[in-house]
Image: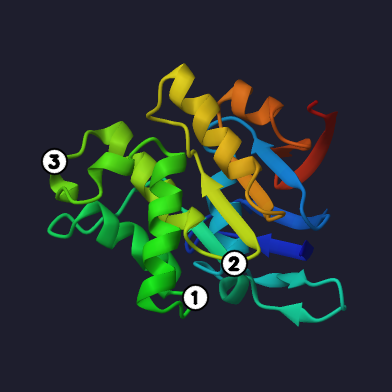
Amino acid sequence: MRVIGEHVTFTHPGGERPVLSDLMMDLPAGSSTAIVGPSGSGKTTLLSLLGELLRPQTGRFSCVDRHGRVFRPRDVATWVLQTVSLLPDRTVSDNVRLGAYLDGADRTTADLRAASALARMSLADRGHESARVLSGGEAQRVAIARALASARPVMLADEPTGQLDGVTTDRVLDALLGSAGRTVVLVTHDGRAAARCDRVLRLDRGRLHPLGDAG
C-alpha cells in the first residue's frame, strides 16, 4: 500500500516555527523507509501525523491500495510506539493478541498470530508470564510482536531498536522488514537500522530529503 503525504504543514500550538513545512511524501507499496534526522527535528511528530495521532494545519496523509482505493492511515496502519505501553497485569500473550484483535481476528486466529510473532522475537517460552516482569528490551520486543500479530498493510515504527543489543536488533529488523509485503516507515537514530531499509529520508527544516538507496 502506497503512503502519500501532500503539502503537510504542522506547527505545535503556541510554537513559532513549523515542524513540517509543505512536506511531500510518496512511499511505494511494500517498501521500507527510514526517516532520520537530529533530535528535535520532528521525526516522531511526523510519524504521529502520518498515523493520525495529530492533525496537520494543512495537507493530508493517505494510503492507496493497488486498486487505487484511498484509506485513512489510522484504518490500515499498525504501530510500534517509542513508549511500549503494555498492559502490565496481563500476560505476554494477551498483550500480543491485541494486535490481532484490533483487526477483528477471532480467538483461534489471534492465538496463532501471537504464537508466531513471539517466536520471531525469540519469546516463545514467555507467553504465559506477566508483562510486568519483562526487562525494557523484552517489553520492546513484545510491543513489536504485537504489531507483527496485526495483518494491517502499513507499519509505523518509532525507534523500535532503541533498547536492544546488536544481535537482537538484527533479529527484530529481520522480522519488521520481512513482514509479508507491508509498507514500513521507520523513525530511527540507529544507522544500522536505517541501512537495512530500501531508502533513507532525512527530515530537515520541515521537509524530507532523499539520501539514496540504503542498500
The residue pinned by badge 3 equals: 133
- Could you say where residue 110 lies in the image, as x and y percent from the top left? 40, 68
Q: Secondary structure at mark 3?
A: helix
Q: Label 2: how many residues lie within 10 Å, few (<14), some (14-19) or many (20+)?
A: many
Residue at image coords 64%, 41%: 177
The residue pinned by badge 1 equals: 103
Q: Secondary structure at mark 1?
A: loop
The residue pinned by badge 2 equals: 152
Residues 59 and 92: in front is 92
Q: In the figure, residue 191 lies in which quadrant? A: top right
**Earlier sequence position, callout 3 versus callout 2:** 3
Q: Are marks 3 and 2 in contact (CB under 8 Å)?
A: no
Q: Are marks 1 and 2 in contact (CB under 8 Å)?
A: yes
- Could you say where residue 146 lies in the image, as x and y percent from the top left? 41, 56
Spatial distance from mark 1 to mark 2, Cα to Cα? 7 Å
Spatial distance from mark 1 to mark 3, Cα to Cα? 27 Å
Q: Secondary structure at mark 2?
A: loop
71 to the left or right of 25 = left
- Could you say where residue 39 lies in the image, as x and y percent from the top left? 52, 32
Task: For the C terminus, give its image quadrant.
Answer: top right
